[in-house]
Image (spheres, grey):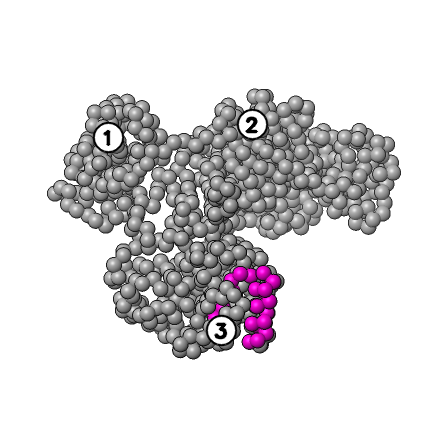
Amino acid sequence: MSELINKVSQFFSSGIIDLFIGYKKGRLGEGKPAFFTKPEQLNELIFDENCIVNLAVYLRKPELKKYSKIGVLANFGTLRALLQLAAENQIADGQYLILTVADGKVLEFANLKAIEEYVANNLPKPNPERIAFLKEIESKSREERWEFWTRELASCIRCYACRAACPLCYCEQCLVECNQPQWVGVPPTGMGNLEWHIVRAMHLAGRCIGCGECEAACPMEIPIGFLTQKLNMAIISNFGQVPGTKLEPDYALSTFKVDDKENFIR
Amino acid sequence: MARIGVFVCHCGENISSTVDCAKVAEIASNYPGVVYSIDYKYMCSDPGQNLIKEAIQKHKLTGVVVAACSPRMHEPTFRKATAEAGLNPYLCEMANLREHCSWVHYREDTTTEKAAELVRVLVEKVKHNEELYPIKVPITKTALVIGGGIGGIQAALDIANSGHKVIMVEKNPSIGGKMAQLSETFPTLDCSQCILTPRMVEVAQHPNITLYTYAEIESVDGFIGNFKVTIRQKAKSVDHKACTGCGLCIEKCPIKKIPDEFNAGLGNRAAIYVPFPQAVPNKPVIDRNNCTYFLKGKCGLCKKVCPADAIHYEQEDELIKVDVGAIVAATGFDIKHSDFFPEYGYGKYPDVIDGLQFERLASASGPTLGVLKRPSDGKEPESIVFIACAGSRDPAKGIPYCSKICCMYTAKHAMLFKHKNHHGKATVFYMDIRAGGKMYDEFVRRAIEEDDVNYIRGRVSRIYEKNGKLIVCGVDTLLNSRPVEIEADMVVLATAAIANSDSEELAQKLHISYDPYHFFSEAHPKLRPVETNTAGIMLAGACQAPKDIPDTVSQASGTAAKVVALFSQDELTREPLIAYVNNNTCVGCFLCQSVCPYLAIEKEEIRRRDGTLVKTVAKINPGLCQGCGTCVALCRSKSIDIHGYTNRQIYAEVSALFNRREYAGV
């Protein structure tokens, strides 16, 4: 940890950064996002397996605009979010100083290309427990699945914490806030909830990097991450496009390849 | 408050035979916002249009719904009438009661009810319509003609003679195309080259035409009036400015056994060559795939003998960028070649040839100087069998269409043979004789009656060789399907006309559509046969479908008329029904850019007055956008919308259908 703190404080003292986004210890032992503006605050900086919050979500917040250069301590989800944001023109090369810790060593990425290589070499396998749960839902009949999701989504209180936590939900005006026309019903009732979660899942189809922040943020513990995970699995198996791994846009809904399988059109 | 007028048309009996139009008008009068509603027998007629104009002024209408035929038919008519009454034309909408209702249903109460619902949907839409104004875009008054066959030549000359600049691109070393290869032409039997070559020379000498031969289209960007085209000038290895066309290099070139494309493989040419003696330009190019210098790095004989020092081996492909306002695709066609007809022994028996090869044998400029000699041993044939529909109209061969030209050229071939060999025996196997055209049937009758060509209606099943003769086994369906066997010295297959092998690639570069056989698609099979669905790109000749010379030339002139009409204006007026971006909500993810089939989405930087960048957003190029709406569907923040079909309008239409109320006791 001292290596990390030393390095970051050097960045501060040499004027390379004026804000560093990392983690400090939370009340329950979790890694809590922390914003460091002075080197003397850095003794609180930590990085361990409990630091799971995706820090990329803060980069597009207007409050950070006043900082000239920002450093980010990125976990793997954050790195993938950065790549996806770059592919979607939201961040530029060299705009941020990106660090991670791998095998106890601090890694500084020279550019986004380096992140692309790092991500390609370290892509984890999908969590078997989640896959098993998805298989279980898939094995149900249409009616049972409908019943499952309407029941789960009925408890949604439409706090939009899932949206706020998602590093890729960066629209300045979300579709649910549009009332001319009113695409999605506002009250947290059956149909409106269903509409919101379908819209959210479809907007993340082929873009979701699977960091799990939406599900972690949900106060009602709705397993919404499975909606995007299922869509992404279909995209990966049909088109081989893995979100958050490429710097260039490679979006299933907007690309056409001559060798695309078309077996889903019946 | 909206003040909508509803005008229900009977379309003669087209609508009123199954829909109670008066009832629809009555029901519509109860819809919220409708202040006037009436039915009339022919709304598109002058009195019908006057009804609309008068109502707009008398009732101070803010929107008009004409419930009549397809908007494709009469939307311009009614929008014009609306404008003449002082209302913005885009406040007029059409409900399609004909195609969407009366034509597809029986006369029942529910048919009238559906018609009333269609009107209600449009009433809800028109409440959200906005005033729109046509878009103006400048026009570059230069045309690009792709292909230097007779179609391209005619189009280029017509456009150039109207005073506009033309750039012609031909992929072969000479212009002239397929017509230059033909011997004589039906139905007058005049020499093909004699009527074509003066036109070729005219193209080369025309002050308004810039000719690029041995060149191909690399890329096409832009839009009607403003295309940006990159032409790949393939390296000729010969400086055509210095070359005098003396031909010494061709004479000295040691590689002389290359199958000659111009002679359909029946003759040979050198590695440095001019395709044919009347070629335009009449200067050689080096075929680098066959030249010893380029294959092995030595030889250089042509360079040594050239008195003008015009041979430049180091020449490279050159990319030439040009701006044009309109594009004419006149890339022609090809014919099916070898191994497509194993049952006819094609490729196995050298004396089974295709129609183009026969043209070369019969041509005075051909490898036999016009004497019909069969390819195997050079003997003059005494009996020739001609097989029409070889491949064409044969779904089993994958070519269900008629190649159109074969009936006529087969009759011509048989006639040419009989004219050269009066005692020869000419037999034609045919399915049907399709000789529609001025003097065409007379021409075929002449072959049968005056030149004694034996026409047998039936298909040929097999050809085999016996004692140096080709035995053609067929059937005569007019004689009780009796099997027939004809001995022949030579067999000519009228093979199917097909699209060029690279036509799909070119269509994709031009962003024009093509049919399953890779012929380019016209915008409308009857009413817009020379335009494509991509504005500013026109079609001439057999690249659209198999065609003979008169049809190609007429279409080429039609194309030229379209180009000249376009160039007659300084600015182009376009329908404003295109996409636009809401800069406030656009987050600039540019996923819309990758999905736009017309490459109409650009980046726009939003800056403060002091020049600092606020953000980069998407911007729609109004000249390019075709209003297809794909970007609208993809935009997550709903920052893109289409004028005339806004999300609000569509949403209002759909909501209207869901929120049904009883407006009358139907």
> Badge 3: how crowded within 10 Å, few (<14), some, or many (20+)?
few
**Residue A22 falls inside the magenta stretch:** yes
Location of residue B320 (image quadrant): top right
CA distance separating discs 1 and 3: 70 Å
Q: Secondary structure at mark 2?
A: loop
The residues bearing labels 2 and 3 have C-alpha atoms spaced at a distance of 70 Å
What residue did someone put label 1 on?
A: B61
Image point (44%, 40%), residue name = B626
State whether residue B237 is above or below residue B197.
Answer: below
Residue B26 in the image, given as x and y percentages of width and height = 16, 35
Q: Which residues are magenta?
A: A1-23
Disc 1 vs disc 3: which is toward the camera?
Answer: 3
For the N terminus of chain A, the quadrant is bottom right
Residue kind at label 3, given as amino acid type: Glu
Q: Is residue B327 visible?
A: yes
Instruction: Give the secondary structure at mark 1.
Output: loop
The residue identified by callout 2 is B141
Q: Nearer the viewer, residue A58 or A69?
A: A69
Chain at tag 2: B
Q: State whether residue B227 is above or below residue A257.
A: above
Q: Are marks 1 and 2 on the same chain?
A: yes
- Can you give x and y, in whole percent of width and height, for residue A253 in the image? 45, 55
What x and y, as percent, mark residue A155? 27, 68
Amino acid type indicated by mark 2: Lys
Whether pointer 1 and pointer 3 mark residues with C-beta atoms closer than 8 Å, the reply is: no
- Amino acid type, mark 1: Leu
Residue located at (27% from left, 56% from top): A185
Kindly give the residue lying farthest to the front in the view shown.
A40
* Between B288 and A164, the one nearer to me in the picture: A164
Is A198 rendered above or below residue B229? below
Instruction: Determine crowd level at label 1: few under 14, some 14-19, many 20+ residues with C-alpha closer than 10 A.
Output: many
Q: Residue B577 appears in which quarter of the rendering?
A: top left
